[in-house]
């Protein structure tokens, strides 16, 4: 156990913990912390160079490579948090569902889950096979030594279930919803199994030193509010609470979730990730100011001329109104072809923005 020296409250107010972790906990910060979904990826030359010699899954499975890719991206951008380089689908393999990434097509699961028997065959006792992610986290933690927040992550039960059932990405989620509506006990059993595996996976990451866990419910927006409540919320809530019980804050993120935000906040996740379709202040109101929020610049704004980009960045910051508990990010991941210098410019804009001004402008 690390011992924490006793500090007076005023010293504590800015020095205890890095600004990313402080913002997750809605503590005051010196400036708004910033990082980017998919900050390590194909838009970056250094990543493409590593990819010339290794597949995506090879990078994930070799802690030296995964740590290198994670660290290089975070240092090059000057961000406040480093997300561990891994993929959402890694837990499928130890559950008995091999997959691969096919060029240009995204992930393909060879034998998708379609029936109660398929669900029954899934393993829940092999999550230790994901140890390699924990080893990569240890390397990143020892490199940064607390300077940046280290983000571990996993998929939410609904989103992972949809990949397992569809066998890859999907437009209409027909197979997923057929199982969900048509065989409720198989659906519940599948989510229960995912919660067991994901909880164990997150524990490996937290024990390795992850400061925060982000749960990606990327496809939650395919559900109506009623279906989200009836078929996805309870399993997500269990996962959020299990991770919080490990002593770290949780960020819960989804896309096209405007109608789901209040329900997502009911999981009591510390931070709710907002996509860009709604102004940040409206999203935060829907979430409630007792939670922190992360977001929410449209990732394609990074292709705009700097002047327009700066206007949009400031719009997001002003909407946050200097309130503690805002982490600047995109509303979804950086896409290939994004100019790296624009991403770096956003980091500077966010760090130079004067929080006090925003607070005064809004609160008078
Ligand atoms: O800095 C980072 O964020 C990198 C770590 C990371 C990856 N995947 C590496 C990756 C993270 C956080 C993910 C999460 C992930 N993976 C999600 C949730 C985030 C989201 O976008 O909502 C999802 C849905 C996946 C599944 C996945 N992985 C898809 C659909 C694809 C193919 C789409 C594409 O962009 O090609 C991947 C591939 C993948 N995972 C890449 C990276 C960097 C693409 C680059 C490559 O092939 O090398």
Image: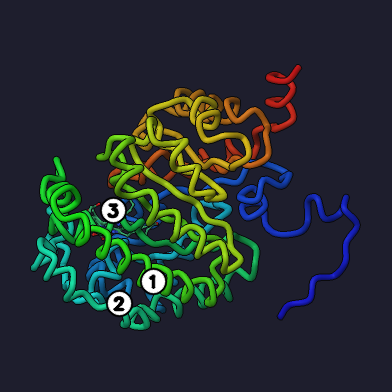
Q: Dot 3 surroundings within 10 Å: few (below 14), some, or many (20 or more)?
A: many
Q: Which mark is residue 124?
A: 2
Q: Secondary structure at mark 2?
A: loop
Image x and y of residue 129, in percent: 33, 82
Count the labels in the image.
3
Which residue is located at x 86 percent, y 54 percent?
A: 11
Give the quadrant of residue 361: top right
Which residue is located at x 18 percent, y 73 percent?
A: 120
Residue matched to label 1:
66
Residue 95 in sight here: yes
Image x and y of residue 27, in percent: 71, 47
Q: Secondary structure at mark 3?
A: helix
Decide if ligand 1 comes within 8 Å of the CB at mark 2: no
Give the vertical position of 223 relative to 68 (above or below): above
Q: CA distance from mark 2 to mark 3?
A: 17 Å
Give the quadrant of residue 194: bottom left
Residue matched to label 3:
159
Image x and y of residue 89, in percent: 27, 64
Q: Earlier in the sequence, mark 3 or mark 1?
A: 1
Question: How has the structure been colored for display?
Answer: rainbow
> Which residue sits furthest right?
8
Q: CA distance from mark 3 to mark 1?
A: 23 Å
Query: Which quarter of the rendering shows the C terminus?
Result: top right
Nearest-to-viewer mark from 3 and 1: 3
Decide if ligand 1 comes within 8 Å of the CB at mark 3: yes
In which of the image's four quarters is ligand 1 placed? Answer: bottom left
Q: Earlier in the sequence, mark 2 or mark 3?
A: 2
């Amino acid at each position: 156990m690390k011992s924490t020296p006793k500090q007076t409250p005023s010293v504590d107010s800015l020095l205890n913990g890095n600004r990313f972790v402080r913002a997750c906990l809605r503590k005051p910060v010196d400036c708004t912390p910033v990082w980017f979904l998919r900050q390590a990826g194909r838009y970056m030359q250094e990543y493409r160079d590593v990819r010339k010699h290794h597949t995506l899954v090879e990078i994930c499975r070799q802690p030296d490579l995964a740590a290198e890719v994670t660290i290089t991206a975070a240092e090059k951008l000057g961000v406040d948090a480093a997300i561990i380089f891994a993929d959402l689908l890694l837990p499928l393999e130890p559950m008995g569902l091999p997959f691969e990434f096919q060029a240009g097509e995204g992930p393909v699961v060879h034998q998708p889950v379609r029936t109660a028997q398929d669900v029954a065959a899934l393993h829940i006792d092999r999550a230790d096979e994901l140890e390699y992610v924990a080893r990569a986290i240890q390397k990143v933690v020892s490199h940064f030594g607390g300077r940046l927040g280290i983000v571990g992550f996993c998929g939410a039960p609904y989103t992972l279930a949809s990949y397992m059932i569809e066998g890859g990405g999907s437009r209409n989620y027909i197979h997923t919803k057929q199982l969900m509506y048509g065989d409720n006990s198989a659906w519940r059993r599948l989510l229960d199994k995912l919660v067991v595996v994901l909880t164990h996976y997150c524990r490996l990451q937290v024990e390795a030193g992850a400061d925060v866990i982000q749960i990606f419910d990327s496809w939650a927006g395919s559900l109506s509010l009623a279906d989200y409540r009836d078929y996805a919320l309870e399993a997500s809530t269990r996962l959020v609470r299990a991770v919080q019980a490990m002593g770290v804050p949780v960020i819960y993120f989804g896309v096209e979730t405007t109608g789901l935000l209040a329900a997502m906040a009911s999981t009591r996740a510390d931070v709710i990730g907002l996509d860009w379709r709604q102004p940040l202040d409206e999203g935060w109101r829907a979430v409630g100011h007792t939670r922190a929020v992360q977001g929410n610049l449209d990732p394609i704004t990074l292709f705009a001329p700097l002047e327009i980009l700066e206007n949009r960045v400031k719009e997001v910051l002003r909407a946050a109104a200097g309130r503690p508990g805002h982490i600047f990010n995109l509303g979804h991941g950086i896409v290939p072809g994004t100019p790296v210098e624009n991403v770096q410019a956003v980091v500077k804009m966010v760090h130079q923005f004067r929080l006090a001004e925003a607070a005064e402008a809004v609160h008078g």
